[in-house]
Each structure stands twice: as C-alpha cells, then as structure tokens.
Image: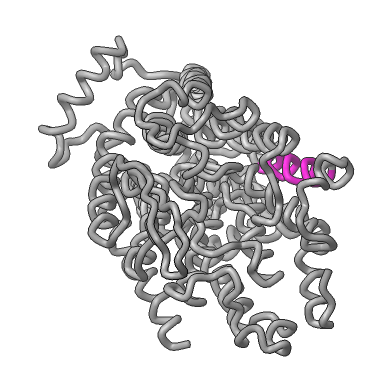
Amino acid sequence: MVTDVLLFIVFFALLLFMAWPLGSYMAKVYHGERTMFDTIFLPIEKTLYRLAGIDATQEMNWRQYASGLLIFNILGLAAVVAIQGLQAMLPWNPEGLAAVPFHLAFNTAVSFITNTNWQAYSGETTMSYFTQMTALTVQNFLSAATGMAAAVALVRGLARKNTKHIGNFWSDMVRSIIWILLPLSIVVSIVFMQQGVIQNLSPYVTVDTLEGGWQTIAMGPAASQEAIKLLGTNGGGFFNANSAHPFENPTPFSNLVQVLSIFLIPAAMVFMYGKMVQDRRQGYAILAAMLLLFTVCLGGIYASERYGNPIAEHSGVNEPANMEGKDIRFGINGSALFAAVTTAASCGAVNTMHDSLTPLGGMVTMLQMMLGEVIIGGVGAGFYGMMMYVMLTVFIVGLMVGRTPEYLGKKIEANEMKMVVIAILIPAIAILVGSAFSVMVDAGLAGLNNAGPHGFSEILYAFASAAGNNGSAFAGLSANTVYYNLMIAATMLIGRFGVIIPVLAIAGSLAEKRVSPPGTGTFPTTGSLFVLLLAGIVVMVGALTFLPALSLGPVIEHLLMLQGLTF
C-alpha cells in the first residue's frame, strides 16, 4: 500500500516538474517569440511554407480557421483510406498483408484523424510497416497538432480584444509538430529503445518454443509509433495488446514514462494558457480542478481493484486484489494508474484489459470519458473541453448573483452559451443514442461476448470511447463488423468536430469583445471556491446525463457481484 501511494506521489511530482517549463516554452512557440531551437526549426518551417505556398503571417477569422482545419482533416482521411486499400502493392510489407476491407479502413482512418485511435484490428496481422509509418504514425502527429491548434485559437480568443483574428491554422499546425511533438517524440523514442521497445523493419521471426512447438514473433518500428501515440494522446498500439505487450512496454520504468508522456502536453497546455493570457493563476485554478477530479478517479479505480472480486477470491482463483487482465510486471498500482491516466486523457493506450476491471473500476474509466475527456484530457482537446465547463460555471454563478457572467473581463453572453451547450451535449447525445440503438438491433447485439449488465457496459463503453475520442475498449465487444465500424466512425467524427467547431466559434466571438475592468461584483476565477465549483459542475453534468445508463451497467453488475451472481 505504501509503495503504491509513493508511485502516485512520484507521478504527480514528475508531471508538474516537467509540465511547467514545457508550458512556458509552448507559450513562446505560439507567440512567435525566440526559442533556443530557432536556428534548427525556423529554416524547416519556412521551407514547408514555401513549398505549400502558405503565408503564415496571414491571420484568419474563426470561419477561415475552421475551414482550413476541416479541409486538412478530410484530405488526411482520404489518404489513410487509400494507403490501407493499396498496402498489398506498397513497400515494407514483408508479411504480404492484404488490403484492408473498406469499412475497416474507413473506421481506422476516421479513428486516426480524430485522435481516437480506436482499433478494430490487430496491428501485427492487418497493417504493413508502410501503413503503420506513413498513414497511422503520421496521423498521430497531425491529429494531435489539430487539437493543439484549436486550443491555441481559443486561448487567443480569450486573450485578444476588438479583433476577428484568432491566428493562422497552418502556422499553428506546423509549429505544434516541429517545435513540440517531433522533438519530444525523438527523446521518448530513444528512452523506449533503451528500455527494450523494438524499432526495426525486419521480417517476423519464427522461433522454437520450450514446449517443442513454434511461434511467430512480430517485429516492426514500434518505438517511433509508441512515443507519439502517448505524447499525442492517440493511443493506437503497434501490436494488438497495446502497452500490455512487452515489445511496447517492457519494464516498470517504461510504464512510468508512458503515463507521464500521456499527461505531459495536456498539463503543459494549462500552464501555457496562464502565460498567454498574462495571468498564471487562471491556469493554476483550471489545473487544480483537473487534478482534483483525477485524484478522486484514480483513488476510485485503485480502491476497487485493490478490493477485488469476492467471487474470485472465495473460489480460490484470485487474491483479494483483482489481478485478472493485468501484467504482474505492473501490478495493481501501475495498472490502476495507467487505466486512470489513459481514460482521463483521451489516449486509449492500455496496459490492462479494461474488460477485466471490477465493475466500479470499469465505471470510473467510462465516466472519465463521458465527462468529455476534460480531466486533463487529450492534447488541446482536454483544455478546450474544460474551458467549456469554465464558461458554464461562470454563467451559472452569474445567474446566482444576478450579473452578466464575465471571464477574463469578457462578458459570456447568449451566443457563447449556445456554443458551450452544443459542445457539451453533442458527445453525450452521441453516446446515449448510439448505445440505445445498438442494444435494440441484432447487428449491435451480435458483437457481444458477455450477457447481462456487463454486455451492456461493453456497448456503452465503446460509444463513450468513440465520442470522447479515447479509443480504448471493453475487449469483450467484437467491433470489427460493418455495423460497428460505421457506427463507431460516425460517433468519432461527431465527438471530434462537433466540439471543435463550436469551440472555434466561441474563440472568434470572444476575440471581438472588449475587455471590461473587474468590478466589486466580479466573481474571482482563481480561488479555491472557483476550483470546487468548476469540479462540481463537471461532476453534476456527468451524473445527471449518464447516471441512468451507468446504473443499468456497472452499478447493477457491482451489486450482483456482491451477491455472488454472474452471467
């Protein structure tokens, strides 16, 4: 128990120690200020602009910014589908893997452009090295940079006044990749290779086993994809077992590096925000609310898994702690921390099979996704998602005291609140409607491998993961069917762009406003009261929206488990 708590303390300490300077560096990058890497990166940036015919100094209004973002992602979607369809004719395919069926290729392409990385396939038996590197790994960078660009645009909307401009999408994309994602990925890749993560283009290896049989061991460039899948909160594993695979996550130290990598940029973006709006306390308050919610969720998962399953314990199959679906290299503490981090950060990488979590442990991972992936959240997406709740909080406080709500001196009016409500409700509607429809049709029920409430939880988790652009799954659901590939793809698109577009609209609206000096009735948004209100609003909205659905799944499953009942 003491060792477990020590791991969590070390994790939080290292995270804050690394995120604070990275946030300051990111603020300089997006402000266009001088950095120590300019002599290396500026020539690369200028060459890219010249080749693409882009004027990076030309500012955009929110509609132009959104149009560039959508067009870029549509072209990326088409490219990833095409590469999968042609992979049998393309190089770096030593195993001769066939073309990917269109419905699966479409689902995968949508998954990677939306930063979800939902994988209805096994990487080592479906995707060639060429596809993994040129389609999936590249999109890991591009989708992460898209979320970062949208977040920076919102920050500019809050920081600027009396203007229609929120930046240049192409400049924000390029700077996100060259100045931030690529250098960090190189460093993390080297650390992973030192720990034992493989990085090669070798054919698969066939070996003789100790039992006298044989086994084919998959090879490939795993370390490079592993780094950006975590730093970009993408989550798509090179191998089917993801970060439970020893070639992706060999040691307890690599496991700690992975969970830190997932949270690093999202946490740094909050520090970046405080610096860009010239009020660091605003960033500290938002980060405090995020960490408060995360600590509660981490404690819930850890306690539930530590308590275990009394049915398994009484049968002599298991220790009091629930080790089913977990690797003994990581134990309860490393597994609970990874599960909490990956579902809080819209990453989706797993070192534990979430289908094997206790009912309440699985419920917490599900709830973090249902809340909109705002508890730290994905790169960019977590920040702008939480900012929707910030505006909702100041609006509710304004109603309480009878004043027009203000944030950073800008009035939050009807237009902004409409967009906030749309951004919060669209993913929730997608989760509930998709889950409800899937339990009513044969095609949805056909994918279940479990009956009763756990089967319902598998479906509910899938749509929560898709709408939250997380990508993890309760593996008992067989999702590689035409029905689920198309339904999940639609949900991923809704969950991504149904939030980004309202966020950019809010950024444009706020940028046009003038700033009013704070008055005697202005509610402070930097103190402990605001932190508690913000965290409470997040929980309240999630509870009111999803409690009935959760009651039909993990809650009733937990109660039945305590009575010794299974399905």
Spot occupied by residue 400 in the image (x, y as percentages of width and height) = 70, 55
Residue farthest to the front, as pictured: 212
Residue 159 visible in the snapshot: no
The residue under the point 48% across, 17% down is 64
Q: On the picture, is 273 further left or further right than 40?
A: right
- Residue 57 quadrant: top left
Q: Residue furthest left?
A: 39
Colour scheme shown: one colour
Question: From the viewer's perspective, is residue 329 above or below residue 429?
Answer: below
Q: Front-most of 542 and 552? A: 552
Q: Which region is colored magenta?
A: 424-436
Is 287 located above or below residue 59 in the figure?
Answer: below
Horizontal and vertical percent for residue 403?
64, 47
Give coordinates of residue 218: x percent, y percent. Answer: 41, 49
How many numbered circles are shown?
0
Q: Going 47% across and 62% down the picture, which residue do you hit?
A: 213
Q: Main secondary structure of the magenta part?
A: helix
* Residue 81 to residue 467: above or below: above
Q: Residue at x 30, y 10 (%)?
A: 53
Q: Quadrant of the C terminus?
A: bottom right
Q: Nearer the viewer, residue 529 or 265?
A: 265
Q: Who is closer to the viewer here, 517 or 528?
A: 528
Question: At which x and y percent is residue 168?
Answer: 37, 23
Residue at figure coordinates x 32%, y 44% from the top left: 224
Which quadrant of the figure has residue 173? top left
> Foreground: 265 or 325?
325
Residue found at the far top of this picture? 53
Asked if 28 appears above or below 17 in the picture, the reply is: above
Residue 185, magenta (yes or no): no
Query: Is residue 160 left or right of 456 when viewed as pictured?
Result: left
Residue 499 visible: yes
